[in-house]
Image (cartoon, grey):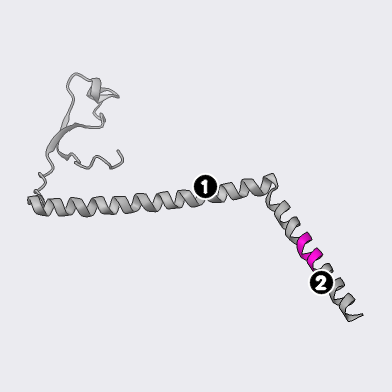
Amino acid sequence: MFRRTFWFTAGAAAGVWATTKVNRKIRQLTPESLAAQAANKAIEAGHRLKDFALDVRDGMAQREAELGEALGLNADPELPSPRDVAALENGSDPRHGKNAKYSKNPTYVERSTYSYNRNEDH
């Protein structure tokens, strides 16, 4: 009697385990689940690619510094002082009309500085 009960229970447990395993695998193979897995893999690959690019950039900077030291290029050249540029006044003079740019005798303002920074917003 105990032997029959043991094998009945073992069979029922194996059936429940197999059913659970099959249902879990079926859920993994649905189109939504496959799309989510593909998206996760793409995001993971993107993170790995970003880390690789950052490592390459760090290596390039390190190698550039090494080459600069070896060739003696690390001495920072002194930047030239800002130069004076003649700039037009705003055209507030009534003799020049509204637009001083197109007037016959524009007034120039000395001592305006020109920025050497090409990345600043103008």
- Residue reaching furthest to the right: 1
Find residue 9 and report its image quarter: bottom right
Magenta run includes residue 16: yes
Figure quadrant of the C terminus: top left
Q: Position of residue 87 (x, y in %)?
A: 18, 32
Within 10 Å of disc 1 (Cα), the crowding (few <14, some 14-19, many 20+) is few
Q: What is the span of residues highlighted in magenta in the rendered image?
A: 14-19
Identity of the residue drawn at 41% across and 49% down: 49
Say what amino acid the circle numbered 2 marks: Ala
Residue lying at 11% horizontally and 54% vertically, measured from the top left: 69
Disc 1 marks which amino acid?
Answer: Ala
Q: Is residue 103 left or right of residue 8?
A: left
**80 or 2: nearer the eye?**
2
- Foreground residue among 104 and 16: 16
Give residue 71's position: percent from left, percent from top: 8, 50
**Quadrant position of the N terminus in the picture:** bottom right
Of callouts 1 and 2, the N-terminal one: 2
Q: Is residue 122 left or right of residue 15?
A: left
113 relative to 59, above or below:
above
| Pointer 2 local density, CA inside 10 Å: few below 14, some 14–19, many at least 20 | few
Q: Nearer the viewer, mark 1 or mark 2?
A: 2
For mark 2, what is the residue? 10
Where disc 2 sits, the SS reads helix
Residue drawn at the location 68% of the way across and 49% of the way down: 29
Residue carrying label 1: 42
